[in-house]
Amino acid sequence: MSKPKISFLSQGEIEDIHNTSLQVLANTGVKVESKKALAILKEAGAKVDYEKHHVTIPRNLVEEALNRAPKTIKYAARNPKYDFMLDKKEPHFCAHGGSPFALDWESGKSRYLTASDVARCYSREVRWGI
């Protein structure tokens, strides 16, 4: 039995998006509110303006981070029998109602999601939802 395959973009289109994203990060930059994240980015080699909470991230820094990122991710179920590995080889689909928890970026601890967390996900600065 063959596995389903789906492709929305050509390899060239993917590379164009990647290269344009790298240019935006290096030239335009991003706004980062977390003081801890600003310090980590500065230490890693990004140009940081603490007063404006603005960061520009050079291409090599992004590429190093991508190379260090895991190639597969284990999704662990409560029952290990239902664990699965997510990789680039196969598509995975699932229903998702959202997590009741959030990772607090300042403390590094998991906590229950608040209404303001959800509102931040739908703010002008953020373009995705939970």
Image: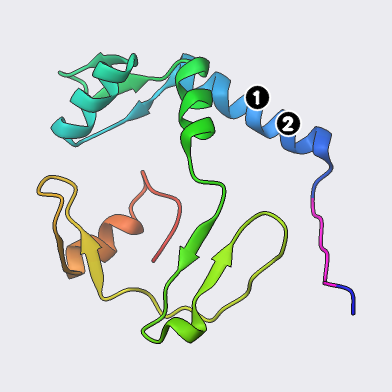
Q: Image quadrant of residue 17? A: top right
> Which of the labelled discs sits on residue 38, or is there none?
none
Instruction: Look at the picture and state if 18 lies above or below 43.
Output: below
Q: How crowded is mark 2: few (under 14 residues within 10 Å), some or many (20 or more)?
A: few
In the image, 68 versus 8, the foreground residue is 68
SS at badge 2 = helix
Instruction: Look at the picture and state if 107 lies above or below 37.
Output: below
SS at badge 1 = helix
Q: Give x and y (percent) for residue 8.
A: 79, 54
Span highlighted in magenta in the image: 3-8
Contact between labelled residues 2 and 1, with CB atoms less than 8 Å apart: yes
> Which of the labelled discs sits on residue 19, or is there none?
1
Q: Image quadrant of residue 48? A: top left
Q: In this view, does 67 lie to the left or right of 33?
A: right
Instruction: Look at the picture and state if 53 lies above or below 92.
Output: above
Q: In this view, does 60 lie to the left or right of 34?
A: right
- Residue 32 lies within the magenta run: no
Q: Three-letter amino acid code at disc 2?
A: Glu
> Which of the labelled discs sits on residue 15, or is there none?
2
Q: Residues within 10 Å of mark 1 (few under 14, many from 20)?
A: few
Q: Three-letter amino acid code at disc 1?
A: Asn
Q: Give x and y (percent) for residue 109.
A: 13, 57
Q: Check the picture and name the quadrant holding the C terminus.
A: bottom left
Q: How many labels does the image show?
A: 2
Instruction: Look at the picture and state if 103 lies above or below 17.
Output: below
Q: Check the picture and name the quadrant holding the N terminus.
A: bottom right
How much space separates mark 1 and mark 2, taking CA atoms?
Answer: 6 Å
Q: In this view, does 1 lie to the left or right of 56?
A: right
Q: Image quadrant of residue 100? A: bottom left
